[in-house]
Image (spheres, rainbow, N blue to C red):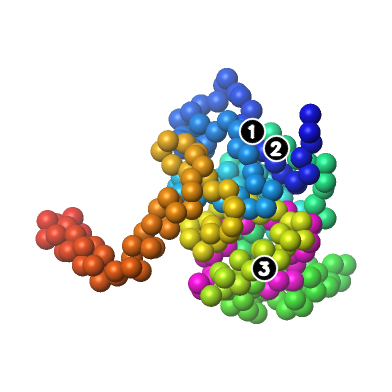
Amino acid sequence: MIISSQFVSRIDLKPDANADPSQYPFSLPAIRSLQTLTLHPKVTCFVGENGSGKSTLLEALAVSLGYNAEGGSRDLRFQTRNTHSDLHARLRVSKGFRRPRTGYFLRAESFYNVASSLDELEEDPYTAGVLASYGGRSLHAQSHGESFLALVMNRFGPDGLYLLDEPEAALSPQRQLTLLARMHQLIQQNSQFVIATHSPILMAYPDATIYQFGADGIEPIAYEDTEHYRITRDFLANPQRMLKVLLADADDASADGHID
């Protein structure tokens, strides 16, 4: 048996005869049908509609690896509210013989809480200096996008495992390109990324494995076949035509009384 050298090579859902398929998160087709998911040694992207389960699985992977459900490094322990599912307890995560030197779980929706926790640590005389790893400034003293990039540019380092949940949420297209370039730099330094994203820019990373989460479960998909790519391409190719169709449909729905 050959042991993989990548940090995380596979995710398996352990069987449970007592699991209730009507209960969240197993009520989601993607989670309910999960058996084995092979991860790319460089970049794996989870894509799909809101509520499809991509962030749920990424969160479960993070928790199973020892990260805080709200994000941060493995050393950052805080909890504002216990809202994560028990999916992590059902996961079997296959790891390689190498261990990451560093890592981070970045989730856009709770990044504010991470920044607040770091400020509290900085004010504590026993943990003061923690912000030095984030560029030396409070993340709250920067815009949302600036704080995201400060994290990625300063805290992320070589030989790292990085789990990113919709990192594009705070980033302009230009800054998404900056993130993509930084990802490539870190990948060249033996890092691995698993990303839940809606961004056609981020999922365009060369040779990335892309999994689509949907009504039929989780399936590999080519970049050009993703809805994110096709809709963006079609819109930019002829925005006026697409807007004409969309706004006409909205006007018809309003006339029928479906939109207030």
The N terminus appears in which quarter of the rendering? top right
State which region is magenta.
150-173
Identify the residue shown where x is 50% and y is 31%.
33
Examine the rendered structure and indicate whether residue 27 appears above or below residue 254.
above
Please give the label number shown on residue 93. Answer: 2
**Helix, strand or loop at mark 3:** helix
What's the CA distance linking mark 2 and mark 3?
A: 26 Å
What's the CA distance linking mark 1 and mark 3?
A: 30 Å
Q: Earlier in the sequence, mark 2 or mark 3?
A: 2
| Magenta run includes residue 169 | yes
| Magenta run includes residue 107 | no
**Helix, strand or loop at mark 1:** strand
Most foreground residue, 67 or 11 = 11
Please give the label number shown on residue 182. Answer: 3
Q: Nearer the viewer, mark 2 or mark 3?
A: 3
Can you name the residue that lies furthest to the top here?
A: 17
